[in-house]
Image (cartoon, helix red, strand yellow):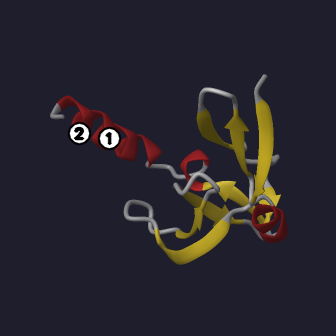
Amino acid sequence: MCEVVDLGGGNFAIVCGAHKSEAKAKPKTIAWPATCLELEAAGYRLMHVRACKLCYAPIEFWETPAHKFLPCDRGRDGKRTPHWSTCPRANEFRKKAEQADLFK
């Protein structure tokens, strides 16, 4: 019979007589829009702030628990919104990504 062992930090090991494997706990999901404190509590980390390359709006880049970057707008009420939902030129970013996939 398999046994789940908590290794701490969201890591678990599944130990069975014939095999061993490790599994990561799923990252927490949060409701949007979120405040800075809610993002940090869910495991997100603020990396840097810069202007959007196309619309020049100031955006914050947060590292997600899955180690991906999430560009966010900071609202007047302190809540964060993913930038791709508000950027007037978001489709131009998407087209570049789709074209890059064609050449792989």
Residue 56 x/y as whole percent = 45, 68
Q: Secondary structure at mark 2?
A: helix
Residue 23 x/y as whole percent = 65, 40
Crowd rating for badge 1 (residues with CA inside 10 Å; few <14, some 14–19, many 20+)? few
Nearer-the-camera pick, 34 or 91 = 34
* Observer able to see residue 32: no
- Tell me which amino acid carries mark 1: Ala
Crowd rating for badge 2 (residues with CA inside 10 Å; few <14, some 14–19, many 20+)? few
In the image, 35: left or right of 102? Answer: right
Q: Quadrant of residue 53?
A: bottom left
In which quadrant is the C terminus drawn?
Answer: top left
Q: Secondary structure at mark 1?
A: helix
Q: Residue at x 61, y 61 (%)?
A: 72
Up/down of 95 relative to 47, above or below: above
Residue 39 x/y as whole percent = 76, 62
Pointer 1: what residue? 97
- Tell me which amino acid carries mark 2: Ala
* Observer able to see residue 48: yes
Residue 63 x/y as whole percent = 58, 63
What's the CA distance linking mark 2 and mark 1? Answer: 5 Å
Pointer 2: what residue? 100
Q: Residue at x 60, y 51 (%)?
A: 86
Q: Are marks 2 and 1 in contact (CB under 8 Å)?
A: yes
Q: Quadrant of residue 81?
A: bottom right
In the image, 7: left or right of 49? Answer: right
Q: Residue at x 52, y 68 (%)?
A: 57
Q: Quadrant of residue 21?
A: top right
In the image, 86: left or right of 4? Answer: left
Q: Residue at x 78, y 22 (%)?
A: 1
Nearer-the-camera pick, 1 or 5 = 1
